[in-house]
Image (cartoon, rainbow, N blue to C red):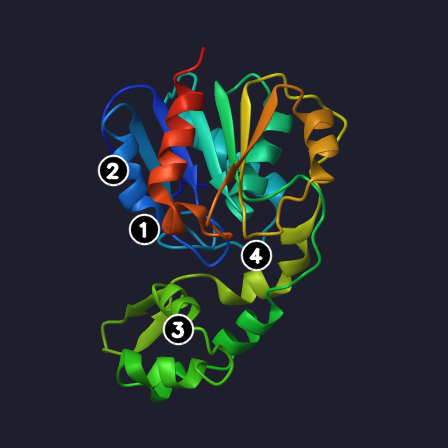
Amino acid sequence: MKLHYRTLGEGQPIIILHGIFGTSDNWQTFGKQLATDYQVFLVDQRNHGLSPHSDTFDYPAMAMDIYEFVQQHQLENPIIIGHSMGGKAAMFYAVTHPNAFAKLIVVDIAPRSYPVHHQHILDAMSGVNLASATSRKDIEDQLKPHLPDFGVRQFLMKNLKRENNNSFSWKLNLSAIQANIENVGVAVPTNNLVDRPTLFVRGAKSDYIRAEDETLIQEIFPQATVVTIENAGHWVHAEQPDALYKSLMKFLQTS
């Protein structure tokens, strides 16, 4: 699968993988910071953004997408950064291709399994009557009773696009994500060690990476370091971009 991407800067390649319901745009501002020292590839994962749609939606497929991306662009020693679902995809890539990257950075997700917790978002998005909507406000008004958080609604509405007849549609493959949502929470296999420098970043106000997760992290990623970003929840790159950048650069510039 040929994933849609945008690239910034020059130097050692960095591939950034967004989370579920996201797009490469979510990391564009942060990517520009990294692009002063690296060549940054902002990727839309399958069934998201402008990348192709597929009925297959699981981490083995996403890991193969990353591998094909590396091969297609002839990237040597890429650094892989993934947030949330993107972090799980990055971990699956690392355990299946342990020699095909230089360093791994996982933002606010652990290798363990997670219960499905996105169903209310899927229900809200699926319940929107796009055919009757004449403006983005119409769509937001339909989402609001189910998703009262303004930031969540704005994040999801980045997935809207206008068709040639001026109607709206979702960029992401909502039906495939809904049919395979349980795959998003599965654990990373523990049968392979990943002996590469690895950084796990957690938000201090997030419970995605718990203290007890560090045992499993070290089991799979023996070179892993875990850092905590204060005053950040799950969206570390949006909430504390300067602190995250400082932590990442310290890790990246350490041999």
Q: Residue furthest front?
A: 230
Front disc: 3 or 1: 3
Q: Which residue is mark 1?
A: 25
Q: Nearer the viewer, residue 154 or 202?
A: 202
Quadrant of the image occupied by residue 96? top right
Q: Which residue is mark 2?
A: 32
Front disc: 4 or 3: 3
| Gap in angstroms between the C-alphas marked 4 and 2 | 33 Å
- 80 over 42 or under it: above or below: above
- 53 over 192 or under it: above or below: below
Q: Earlier in the sequence, mark 4 or mark 1?
A: 1
| Gap in angstroms between the C-alphas marked 2 and 3 | 26 Å
Q: Which residue is mark 4?
A: 55
The spot of residue 37 in percent (x, y) is 26, 23
Q: Earlier in the sequence, mark 4 or mark 2?
A: 2
Q: Which residue is mark 3?
A: 150
Local SS, label 2: helix
Label 2 sits on what residue type? Lys
- 198 over 134 or under it: above or below: above
Q: What is the number of the mark on residue 49?
A: none
Q: Residue at x 63, y 16 (%)?
A: 195
Q: Residues within 10 Å of mark 1 (few under 14, many from 20)?
A: some
Q: Residue at x 23, y 78 (%)?
A: 166
